[in-house]
Image (cartoon, rainbow, N blue to C red):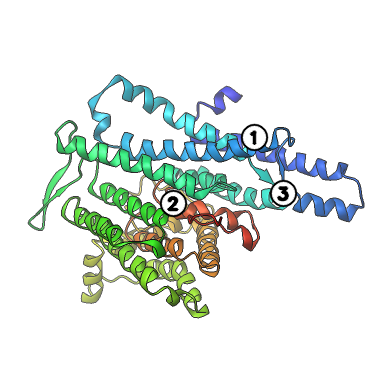
Amino acid sequence: MLSSLFTTGIYGYLDLVLIGWSLGLVWLGGLALLKKGSFTQKVRAALADEHLLFGDWCGAARAGAGDWAFAVSMALLQFDTFFMNSNMRQIHAAWYAFLATWLEVVYFGLLILKLVLLTRYSGLQLAAGYCFFFVFRWVFLNSGQFWVVAGMMFFLGAKDIQPRRTLRMGLAVSAASFFAVTGAAALGWIPTLRTQVDDRLRDSFGYGWFNLTGVILLALCVMYVCWRQAERLRWYDFIVLAAALLFCDRGPYSRASTVCIALLILLAALARFFPKLAKPAGARVLVSAAPAAAFGASLLGGRLYDPSVPLWTALDSLLTGRLSLAHEALAGSSVAIAGQRLTDAGFLVDNFYVNLWIWGGPVESLLFWGAVTALLWRLMKKGTVTESACLVVMLAHAVMEGHFIWPCINVCLWLLPCVLYLLPRQRVAGFGRSPE
């Protein structure tokens, strides 16, 4: 049985976590029953006391190993996405074939170890995380959307990590991978994709599609701002971001990523020079409403789109056809409560809000966007303006692309465990430097 679990890809990885967490819930319950005291005290202990599953042996070492397991797993995923998922795959080198075979097994194996054996949980935390995991696994069996369920596994695995250290490692691996691919493409070592659009040359710089190049560049900018922190940005940081903006516009000509890098620069400048703007309660409410506003606007826009109305066609052109594509998919499909696999329908929906609603269904959609809203509220309330601004930028990008839930792209969602596990307010993490 175990051998089959390791050979069925993501299905097997999900089953291993399901088995481990199910046994872990039983173990936590049994541990509480063996505790001395009244029944009420046993219940409180079961809900509140955090333990490593299956015994606290080597507790400190296992907790430290869990932090590194997540960091290495995340770095390998970023290397796989930013380097291996490029036209490097066309060089047919022996090393590439070897790495491509084993990379996914290694980083998912580390993540499973982190989730099952290297993380402390209370009964309440594990039960809350189990509910999220169960829903996304259940929907995945119907929809087959890899990145949605893989993203949720990584976000669940981010509990109790050191976000800043993991971010530094991820940024270094991502930047090195990106420059290696674009450099190899510029030197002609690997093929690239070129086309003429609006009298301009688009170049993918070694990746399989222009928008993938753009979103990787956006991800690097978001990681850079999270690492540097908006309130600490200097003039040279804005030069770096402006250079990325110019490259994204003149190179891959990815409109969504270019607009979002510009939005990132604007929000970073506001956070740097006008930090008091984010402090009023009204500002927190307004920013926290962004996921609901974008979700509602995307669904309503797709439903109400009318190609005979000039305003709709102009807006559709501005969004490079995203509205008409969403309208076609919404009109031609029904709502499935637990997701659906529309492989024969031929719908292409880049708007992630609409995409998740159709393929993931209302349960997964509302659960996920509710968690993102709660995270944004908690970040704003804590005063982590940098992370809040970067998350808003990624929410804007989700209107035109589907990379929002990729854990290697949207690093802001590494902070989701405070919501997924119902952690208290003081355990809302950020990417800033820890106080001395």
Q: Is 58 drawn above or below residue 122 in the view shown?
A: above
User: What number is the disc on residue 61?
Assistant: 1
Q: Total marks drawn? A: 3
Q: Is residue 184 left or right of residue 414?
A: left
Residue pointed to by mark 2: 411
**CA gap, disc 3 and disc 2:** 25 Å
At label 2, the amino acid type is Val
At label 1, the amino acid type is Ala
Q: Residue furthest front?
A: 436
Seen at 67% across and 48% down, the residue is 126
Residue pointed to by mark 3: 122
Provide the secondary structure element on which disc 1 rests. Answer: helix
Q: Position of residue 48 (x, y in %)?
A: 75, 53
Q: Residue furthest left?
A: 199
**CA gap, disc 3 and disc 1:** 19 Å
Q: Kindly check if marks 3 and 1 are in contact, taking CB atoms under 8 A apart as contact.
A: no
Q: Counting residues from the N terminus, which is met first, the one under dot 2 or under dot 1?
A: 1
Of 394 and 4, the residue lying toward us? 394
Of 275 and 377, the residue lying toward us? 275
Q: Position of residue 358 (x, y in %)?
A: 43, 56
Seen at 29% across and 41% down, the residue is 178
Q: Position of residue 77 (x, y in %)?
A: 42, 38
Seen at 43% across and 77% down, the residue is 277
